[in-house]
Image (cartoon, rainbow, N blue to C red):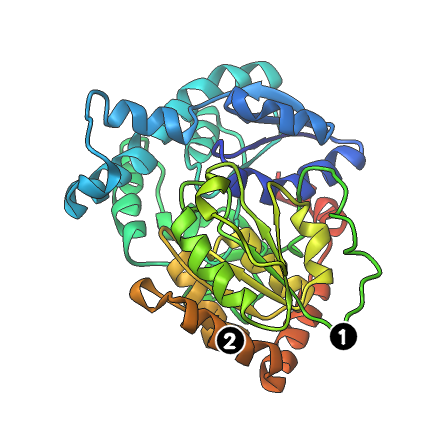
Amino acid sequence: MRILFTSLASYGHLYPLLPLAVAARAAGHDVVYATAPDFHPTLEKAGLETAAAGLTLQEAFGRLFAGDTRGRHEIPEAELNEAIGKGFGRLLPTEFMTDLAPVLAERKPDLVVYEVGNPGGAFAAHRAGIPAMAHGFGRVSPGGLVEHIAKRIGELAAELGLTGDSRLFWGHPFVDICPPSVQAPEFVAGARRVPLRPVGWSEPGELPSGIEGRDRSRPLVYLTLGTTGASQAHLLTSALRGLAALDVDVLVATGPSVDVEALGEVPSNVRLEAWVPQSELLPHVDLVAHHGGSGTTLGAFAAGVPQLVLPQGADQFTNADAVVEAGAGAKLLGDELTTDAVRETASRLLSDSTVADVVRALAAEVAGMPSPEEVVAQLPQYV
């Protein structure tokens, strides 16, 4: 079978599709992955053939704000929301749809698997008369910015003659990597879900020294605010100093957007790493303090680790809500994110037996979901 995968050009949108794409290739299917060229090296490291399509998020919003010298926080919220809706709901889908048309004509795939943030894949498949399957990256969360985006997507879909509810992805089969117990109940009730175990993906690499085989009697806390602009030095500083005040070791993944020098001198029990293979690290930690990105949230569920969520934007707030509602952790918002609050909340989570029971149950739920290989075996029925 010939399968084309496509996602937005962002790690948080691309990584969730890689386990299924790699499993499909390993099963002997002809697989090509289409996204912006900036992310082709990542795909090639995974052994996947690539095709160029779409824009990066930076390119898209560079177009929308071309010539605008204001910083993000200087833009009124209503104007920013409108731009986000236009970017994700009109500009990016149109660019992907246009670029995918010749790829589909040449490759003639039997199935298009599109990441839900990239409806341009669904639109291109619809125009070409090719069956399509949506692939999620986490909890499907209504409200907030999602409404601005969904409105634009619905308008574009109607123009193209694609009928059905855009919030249920026009009735397409939906590969759902979110454990059912924390997925939005209304989505579980209405979507054509194809459950898939969330398998963490990270660039190949070695764990920092001393992680494997360490003494588990001393807790290890992992702190990350992701790979995007959410990773701000002042936020990391408050969080790491709160964590460092505990009798624990703290491993901080600073990411590419943090000026490490701005963190100043860190306590002796804090270790800074520019990058870690997160999927391999999570089973070794006792608490994850993070921004609420879907990959980290689901990875912590799978590893059975309590979470302290410090959301900054996008779907991070609803992910934080899901963690709290499940009893798997806590969240700190806005002005609540102080050094003292981080220390007190992390201390409670590390010792709370009820939370420990919840995260163990979530890990068992994730382990019981179908593997990528099992889902690949189902794909022919959707053609």
Q: CA distance from mark 2 to mark 1?
A: 26 Å
Q: Secondary structure at mark 2?
A: helix
**Number of numbered discs on residues:** 2
Residue 128 in percent (x, y) is at: 47, 24
Q: Is residue 200 visible?
A: no
Taking the spot 29% from the left edge, 32% from the top edge, the residue there is 90
Amino acid residing under circle 2: Ala
Query: How packed is label 2: few (under 14 Cα within 10 Å), some, or many (20 or more)?
Result: some
Q: Which residue is mark 1?
A: 217
Tell me if 73 is positioned left or right of 254 in this view: left
Taking the spot 37% from the left edge, 52% from the top edge, the residue there is 167
Q: Secondary structure at mark 1?
A: loop
Tell me if 349 is positioned left or right of 333 in this view: right
Amino acid residing under circle 1: Ser
Q: Which residue is mark 2?
A: 326
Residue 189 in percent (x, y) is at: 46, 67
Residue 168 in percent (x, y) is at: 41, 53
352 vs 11: above or below: below
Tell me which corner region of the image, top left, top right, bottom left or bottom right, holds residue 300: bottom right
**Front one among 96 and 158:** 96
Query: Badges 2 and 1: C-beta atoms under 8 Å apart?
Result: no
364 vs 137: above or below: below
| Image depth: mark 2 or mark 1 in front | 1
Query: How packed is label 1: few (under 14 Cα within 10 Å), some, or many (20 or more)?
Result: few
